[in-house]
Amino acid sequence: MNHSVGGVDLKQKSLLKVGVMDFITSTAILPLLCGCVGIFSLFKLLQRLRMKAYLRNAVVVITGATSGLGRECAKVFYAAGARLVLCGRNREALDELTRELAASQAAKVQTHSPYTVTFDLTDPGTIVAATAEILQCFGHVDVLINNAGVSYRGAIVDTTMDVDKRVMETNYFGPIALTKALLPSMIQRRQGHVVAISSIQGKISLPFRSAYAASKHATQAFFDCLRAEVEQCGIEVTVISPSYIHTSLSLNAVTADGSRYGVMDEKTAQGRSPVEVARDVLAAVGKRKKDVILADLLPSLAVYLRTLAPGLFFSLMASRARKERKSKTC
Ligand SMILES: NC(=O)c1ccc[n+]([C@@H]2O[C@H](COP(=O)([O-])OP(=O)(O)OC[C@H]3O[C@@H](n4cnc5c(N)ncnc54)[C@H](OP(=O)(O)O)[C@@H]3O)[C@@H](O)[C@H]2O)c1
């Protein structure tokens, strides 16, 4: 009896299957599906073409081009046909990068010899002079990528105010001074794009990173305000918040007394390749994204946890601080 019921069920199921397949193939569903896939592919193609056109010949200024992410950004924007102004403190490193770009064969479009401008973001006097030099290179700036930055490791109680100020000057006051100096020429042309390389620590704060997290939170806030203020002038603002990238950031970080940290942190060593992150920066700029988090699931979830369950987030951070302090004192 049961067997025959099972048989009927099977028969009914296969009839239903055939019916559904017939419906898909014989009615409007299949053409509709094909149409959707076609429209999606066309949209993607148009988006890619629009992105390429946006970056080709664009005048792109990159700060911190001597190392890590900035260096890789220089390579991908160069290969995309951008006219580059590479900024940094180290003239030799910038010249070496320029030679490397000239020797590279990666570009499928016409490339342009970059200009280089040296200045220190912690020195407001040099920023004013550098802005004039930057504007002289190609006559205007299309995209400013505020990438240069310094990290920090230390306990708040041990950290001198000089260190807090140095980190804020490099990561916040320097980039906003450069942005403000270039902004009038962008507003005049009613065209321009300002990019801030922030950090996931611009959205959540980790213990023993106070100065860095504070400078990146300030960066996020400033550029969010800027986006709203200049939208009607035709200027785009993109804030990019990556998680760990395998660069020299932790080696170059400053400590509580201002000395160089000089350690390649495990998390930084295990971070994403700067080449991949540079490609994501290129895509975010090309697609004119407003706010981008470049992080794995866990750090991305932490951002939401900070908003949705702050109590839990604070407990987790306190526990992390206890563990980190213990590992240092052991
Ligand atoms: N690596 C990560 O895990 C990570 C994660 C999230 C966000 N980020 C952000 O990514 C950006 C690039 O950092 P990175 O990882 O590529 O580190 P990096 O390899 O240490 O590069 C930092 C760059 O900033 C420049 N710089 C530092 N202080 C400067 C100053 N006072 N004036 C002018 N330039 C200065 C450095 O120039 P010199 O060569 O002259 O020192 C270097 O070119 C930073 O904004 C950082 O906060 C990094």
Image: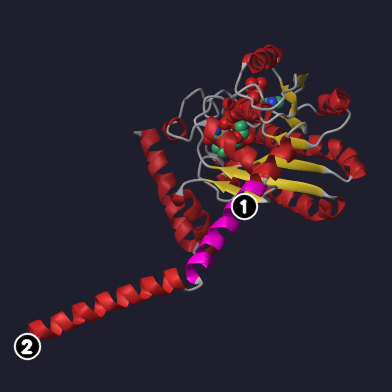
Q: In this picture, which residue range is highlighted in magenta?
A: 29-46
Q: Is residue 36 magenta?
A: yes
Residue 319: where, in percent of width, then height? 40, 50
Work out whether residue 272 or residue 156 is closer to the camera in this orientation and state it: 272
Residue at the far bottom in the pictured view? 1
Q: Nearer the viewer, residue 6 or 29?
A: 29
Identify which residue is drawn at 86% across, 32% down.
Answer: 140
Mark 2 and ligand 1: say if the CB distance to the nearest ligand atom is below 8 Å.
no
Looking at the image, how many numbered discs can be counted on the residues? 2
* Residue located beneath label 1 in the image: 42
- Which image quarter holds the N terminus? bottom left
Residue 125 visible in the displayed image: no
How far separated are the C-alphas under marks 1 and 2?
56 Å
Residue type for callout 2: Met
Question: Is 197 on the left or on the right of 236, as rendered?
Answer: left
State which image quarter holds ligand 1. top right
Q: Is residue 321 above or below residue 38?
A: above
Q: Is residue 73 visible?
A: yes
Residue 3 rendering spot, x and y as whole percentages: 8, 82
Give the class, few, some or many, for how many residues have Cα within 10 Å of label 2's Cα (few <14, many ≥20): few
Q: Is residue 171 magenta?
A: no
Which residue is disc 2 drawn over?
A: 1
